[in-house]
Amino acid sequence: MEKLVITGKTHLKGEVTISGAKNAAVAILPATLLIDGICTIDNLPNISDVKMSCKILEDLGAKITWNTPNEITIDTRHINKTVASEELTRKFRASYYMIGSMLGRKGAITVGMPGGCKLGARPIDQHIKGFEALGATVEVSQGKITATASELTGTSIYMDVVSVGATINVMLASVLAKGTTVIDNAAKEPHIVDVANFLNTMGADIRGAGTDVIKINGVEKLTGNSTYSIVPDQIEAGTFMLAAVASQGDILIKNCISKHLESLTAKIIEIGGQVEDYGDSIRVKMDKRPSKATIKTLPYPGFPTDLQPQMGVTLSIAEGTSRIIESIWESRFQYTEELNKMGAQITAQGKTAFFEGVSSLYGSPVYASDLRAGAALIIAGIIAEGKTEVYNLEHIDRGYENIEEKFRKLGAKIERVEE
Ligand code: EPU
């Protein structure tokens, strides 16, 4: 078993370059199934969720060539199966995008029930509602999902909840459908815009992505033969912004889109940090303990749930008592128990947690319960006095490329060791 051994207390300083967005990449890879041709994807984060997506595609008959660690060429001309590997699809959440893509490509697919971070109930009723509205039949039984459609026909779909996954999945299924599909109450995250941009580059006709009404005019086929570069990961950028604040450091975050981080930037300024916005890079500086704050997670452009644990560490050492309301996921405060082992004073109950700020954290062995909890515990180790060991790295490796190397370049004393 691997663990990260971190010796604190470090003020992070220097520059970091952000990778491509995980949550865009894991949707764009299945979207290549709609092409029936060849395309190249660049700025692909080299993370385990991406490698798993590639394995599922290869198992379905795609040919993938790794041109560099961050660029692949995919040939999806010879897709010859309609049953995806159950073992692989169960391993991560975004495997559900195989459903929308394969419905569009072959009119049929069976996948294992998607896995992913354990953040409480993760229903997919809105995905199913969308597929059925387009004319598909969806059956969920014995841990598998089977979707079939002899024909998909565009229609209007109102999403009962704002869902990133359902918005993208229905968009995927609609690209080659007959007529026009309108998704109302759509999610607006930057990765939704990125998936739409990718599909449009390949010949789709999607309008309005990034607003809450997306219109997809079905086209006969996608053309491929293009290169697409994935958008920078706003959550990775936000993780380093908060690492700068929590460690009282000074970090220039390169290859990011500052517009995607406005809710975080506003909170960082509110708690006493300095933010210099250069558009495609952001410098964050902090020279004192943060002040207290109240945060509520919301769909984009609200404060992202995927930065809530990293903000939680930051507020654990703030002056005064802060409050975080998690309104997206039921169980996203599991990291607070680990932080309490390090001397934090956090009380979490249901969807609210109170952070009574302490002046310092102390090193301890801690366990990542999920991806963003893992990132938060690394920041905690960097700002704590003494030695911290972070376990369950498989969660962190799902979504952060070379994370310890990036932190090491900023001055962190962090090593990955085999136990
Ligand atoms: N929901 C439903 N029904 C559905 C779908 C969602 O009730 O059919 C509810 C969920 O229970 C949740 C809310 O709607 O309360 C939002 O869920 P959403 O569908 O937006 O989440 P997701 O698509 O499963 C993606 C990211 C998550 C991120 C959320 C919210 C991917 C692969 N995952 O999940 O990322 O937290 O959006 O922004 O894109 C992460 O990267 O660490 C991560 C967990």
Image (cartoon, helix red, strand yellow):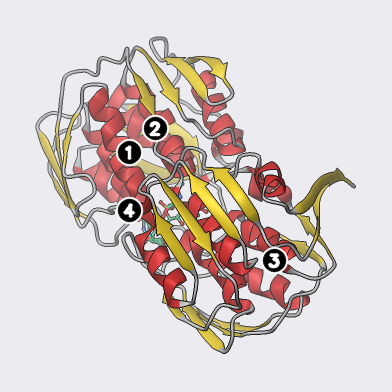
Q: Are marks 4 and 3 in contact (CB under 8 Å)?
A: no
Looking at the image, is mark 4 or mark 3 earlier in the sequence?
A: 4
The quadrant in which the N terminus is found is: top right
Quadrant for ligand 1?
A: bottom left
Residue 4 sits above or below residue 52 on the image: below
**Residue 194, which numbered label?**
1
Comparing marks 3 and 2, which lies closer to the viewer? 3
Looking at the image, is mark 2 or mark 4 earlier in the sequence?
A: 2
The residue at which mark 3 appears reads as 380
175 or 405: nearer the eye? Answer: 405
Q: Label 2 amino acid?
A: Ile
Q: Label 3 amino acid?
A: Ala
Residue 402 locus on image (x, y percent): 66, 39
Q: Label 4 amino acid?
A: Lys
Mark 3, secondary structure of its residue? helix
Residue 248 sits above or below residue 404 on the image: below
Mark 2, secondary structure of its residue? helix
Q: In which quarter of the image is residue 276?
A: bottom left
In this picture, residue 414 sits left or right of residue 59: right
Residue 142 in sight here: no
Q: Are marks 4 and 1 in contact (CB under 8 Å)?
A: no
Looking at the image, is mark 1 or mark 3 earlier in the sequence?
A: 1
Looking at the image, is mark 4 or mark 1 earlier in the sequence?
A: 1
The residue at which mark 2 appears reads as 28
Q: Quadrant of residue 296?
A: bottom left
Looking at the image, is mark 1 or mark 2 earlier in the sequence?
A: 2
Comparing marks 2 and 4, which lies closer to the viewer? 4
The residue at which mark 4 appears reads as 259
The structure residue drawn at horizontal position 39% and vertical position 44%, both measured from the top left corner, is: 280
Q: Distance between the residues labelled 1 and 3?
A: 32 Å
